[in-house]
Amino acid sequence: MNINKLADVNTRNRGSYYDASVSLIVKGTKVEVRKILNIYTSIDLSSNKFTGEIPEAIGELKSFRMLNLSHNDLRGSIPSLMGNMTLLEALDLSSNQLTGTIPRQLTNLTFLGTLNLSQNHLSGPIPRGSQFNSLPNDSYQGNLALCGFPLTEKCKKDEPPTLQVEDEDDDDDDQDWFSWKIMVSGYFCGLVCGLSSGYIAFTTGKPRRIVIFIEGAQQKFIRRYMKISESLSFSVQRF
């Protein structure tokens, strides 16, 4: 739990290392360790028949360098308190029955060089940051519900929004329909004004003055109507 106290005790008694030797699986490779340094704090409990959940108290072992619990029958989720094991360099929890998400607190393990969570039932996005940005996809194989970098399976919230081409076409159709409606309305107004001026001219007997008046009013009306239609069309395009 406290590497400083452990180092002080062993320095007084034997020096800076243990005389015993032990075989460990270090970063996926079996290694025979001799004259073990007292700072070489590791536990290898792999390939046993341990069941149950990983205890939360494991997060108190802050001086650990390596931890191997692979090839057991451990269940439940990965304790978030493992993020307190900030000196951890290698963590192997592969080939168990672990479920849930990968705790974001594991990104606090800035010395982590090897991580193996493969062959479990983990799900959700892989955390980003710190050492997790450089870990290979082999660290996560066999977890079919995991997503995100470095896996090819993208998380849904990371996918870019798809362009709705049909909606854009509908907007263009609506805009074209609006423009045609304005144009037809303008021609209809011009036709009505023309027929009205002709009728008044023939019925009153003063065609020239009335025609000039009607034509002037008609031109003013058309210019005003076109300005309104242009402003409305520009508003539709911006929208």
Image (cartoon, helix red, strand yellow):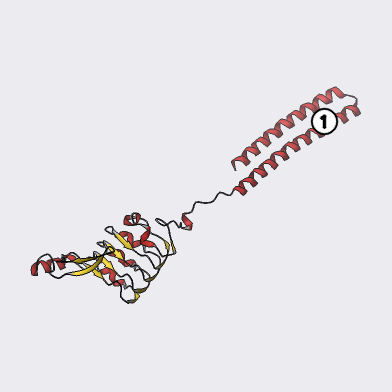
**In the picture shown, does residue 178 fall above or below 69?**
above
Furthest toward the top, the residue is 208
Going 24% across and 64% down the picture, which residue do you hit?
Answer: 65
In the foreground, 116 or 132: 116
In the foreground, 224 or 70: 70
Quarter that holds the C terminus = top right
The residue beneath circle 1 is: 194
User: What is the quadrant of residue 202 in the picture?
Assistant: top right
Percent across and percent down for residue 232 are: 65, 39
User: What is the quadrant of residue 90 in the picture?
Assistant: bottom left
Badge 1: few (under 14), some or many (20 or more) residues near its Cα, within 10 Å? some
The amino acid type, in three-letter code, at marker 1 is Gly
Quarter that holds the N terminus = bottom left
Q: Is residue 221 left or right of residue 209?
A: left
Q: How many marks?
A: 1
Percent across and percent down for residue 83 are: 31, 64
Going 16% across and 68% down the picture, which residue do you hit?
Answer: 6
Percent across and percent down for residue 138 are: 36, 60
Percent across and percent down for residue 84 are: 28, 64
Q: Secondary structure at mark 1?
A: helix
